[in-house]
Image (cartoon, rainbow, N blue to C red):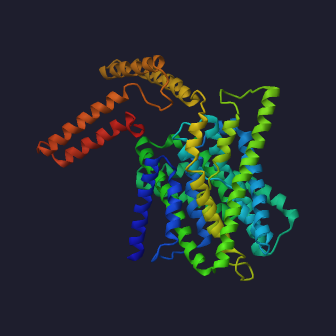
Amino acid sequence: METFEWIILLLLGAALLATLARRLGAPYPTFLAIGGACLAFLPQTPEWTLDPHLALTLFVAPVLLDAAYDTSLRDLRDNWVPVANLVVVAVGVTTVAVAFVARWLVPDLPWAAAIALGAILAPPDAAAATAIVRQVKLPHRLMKILEGESLLNDASALLIYRLAVIAMVSGGFAFSGIGPAFLMSVLGSVAVGVGFAFVFPYLIALFDDAPTSLIVQFATTFGVWIFAEYVGLSGILTIVCYAMTMARRGGSRMPARLRIPVYAVWETVVFVLNAFAFVLIGMQLRPIWDRLDMALRYQYSITALAILVTVIIVRFAWVMTYNSAVRLKIRRYGFHPPRPMARPTVRGGLVISWAGMRGIVTLAAAFALPEHLADGTPFPHRDLILFTAFCVVFGTLVIQGLTLKPLIRWMNLRDGDPVGQEVKWARTEAYRAAIDEIRDDGDMQAKLLCKEYSAVVELSEVSPLQSGSGELPGNTLRRRAIAAARRKMEELRLDGAIGDDAYHLLEEEFDWAELSAGAARA
C-alpha cells in the first residue's frame, strides 16, 4: 500500500511541477529534475530499484518512437549535413572530451568506463529543447535541426556506449572487429526496423477500438526493441527506422476516432516515463550520497561540475566552429537550399549551441550500467557515473533550460513562417479536392457543404497568413457557437428537461465539433 501511495503522490507532484513549468514558460523536464534532486535528500523516501537491463527498454523505447513518428523525413533530408555533423561529430567529440576529463580527475577510472560516461552524456534531449522552442516560434530550419539531432544522436551515442560497456564487462574486445560489427549493427537495425513497419500495421489494423489498439501498439513497440537487442542490433536505431516508416505507411490507416485518444495516451505515457526516470535516479542518489565521506563528496561534486562545464563548452566550440565554416562557404559559393529556409547565422549557431540540455536518455543509459563485471567484481565507479549523469542533466536543464527562451527572444530570429505558408496553400488545395468530390451530388446536403467549403477556400486565399497555427477561417465563431450550445445543454439538464443519457450523447457530439473547430490549439 505504501508503494501505491508514493506512486500517486509522485504522479501528482509531477503534474503540479509540469503545470508550474508551463505557467513560467520553462521546459517541464527542468522542474522534474529539480523534483528528482529534492527526492534524493528527503527523509523517508522509498528505495526503489529497477533492473538495469530494463531501464533503456522501459524509458527510451516509447519516448523515441513518439519522437520518431512525428519527424519530417523531408526536413531531415533538407538539413542532413548539420544534423549529421551534430549526430556523428559532436557526439564523438563530446564523448572523447568527457572521457579525458574524467580520466584526468579520476586516474583509476578505466578508459572503457570513461568512454561509457562520455557516451552517456553526449546526446541532448528532444523533450527539453522542443518544449522551449515551440513557445517562442524558433525558425523552422533550426527547429528541424534540433529535432533531427535529438532523434538520431541517441543512436550514435548509445552504439558507442554499448561497445564501451561490452569492453568493460568482458575485459576487452578486438578493435579489428569493431568496424564490421558497427556496420552490421547499423544495416541490420535499419533493415529490421523497416521490415517490422511493413508487417505490424496489418496486425494493429485488426483492432478497431482504442484500448486494445493501444495495448497492441505498446506491445509491438517493446517487441521491436527487445527483438533488436536479442539479436545483437541497436534497439535505438531499429525503433527510429520502425517509427519513421510506420508514420508513412500505417498513420493514414488509423481512423480519427482512434487517432485522437491514441495520440493523447502516447503523450501522457511520455510524460509519465520522464517523471519516473527523474524519480528513480533521484532515489538512487541518496544511498550513494550517504555512503560517501566528506572527501569523496567533494571529489564527486568537483568531478560532476568539471564534466558539466566540459559538456557545455565542447558543444559551444564545435557548433560555432561548424557555423563559421558554413557561413564562409555561403559567402563564397552562395546559399542554394532545396526550398526556402533561413540562412545560417551567428545567432542561430548560438541558439543551437545553448540548446544542449540532457534528459531521459542520459538518465536511462546511466541507470542501465551493469552493477557487476563478468568476473563478479563491481562495475568501477558506477556510483560516480550515476551521480555525474544526474548532475549534468540537472545542470543543463536548469542553466540552459531556464535561459534558452530569453536567449531566443533576445536574438529575435525570424524566418517568414514556411510552415504557415505550406498550411495555407495545402488547405486551399485540399478543400478544392473536397468540393470536386461532392459537386455533382444534387441533394441539399451536398450544396450546403460545397458552399461551406468554397467559403473556406475563398477566406484562405484572401486572408493573411495566420502564423502557421492551422486555424481555419471561422473557427473562432464556431467555438463561440458551440460554447453557447453547451451552456444551453447544461441549463436543460439542470432543469430536468433532459436526462444524463441524453446529456452525455450531446456532450460527445459537441466534443467532436469543438475539436473540429480547432479547440486543441485554442
Compare residues 344 and 378 and report the one nearer the observer. 344
Compare residues 274 and 383 and report the one nearer the observer. 383
Placement of the N terminus among the 4 image quadrants: bottom left
Q: In the displayed structure, does residue 356 sit left or right of residue 186?
A: left
Query: Residue 19: image x %, image y %?
Result: 42, 52
Compare residues 254 and 443 and report the one nearer the observer. 254
Residue at 76 percent of width and 69 percent of height: 105
Count of numbered badges drawn on the protein? 0
Which of the 4 image quarters holds residue 255?
A: top left
Residue at 61 percent of width and 64 percent of height: 390
Query: Residue 10: image x %, image y %?
Result: 43, 65
Query: Residue 267: image x %, image y %?
Result: 48, 51
- Decide: is 191 above or below 327: below
Query: Residue 484: image x %, image y %?
Result: 24, 34
- Decide: is 83 above or below 396: above
Placement of the C terminus among the 4 image quadrants: top left
Q: In the displayed structure, does residue 324 sit left or right of residue 432?
A: right
Q: Is residue 268 visible?
A: yes
Q: Is residue 50 visible?
A: no
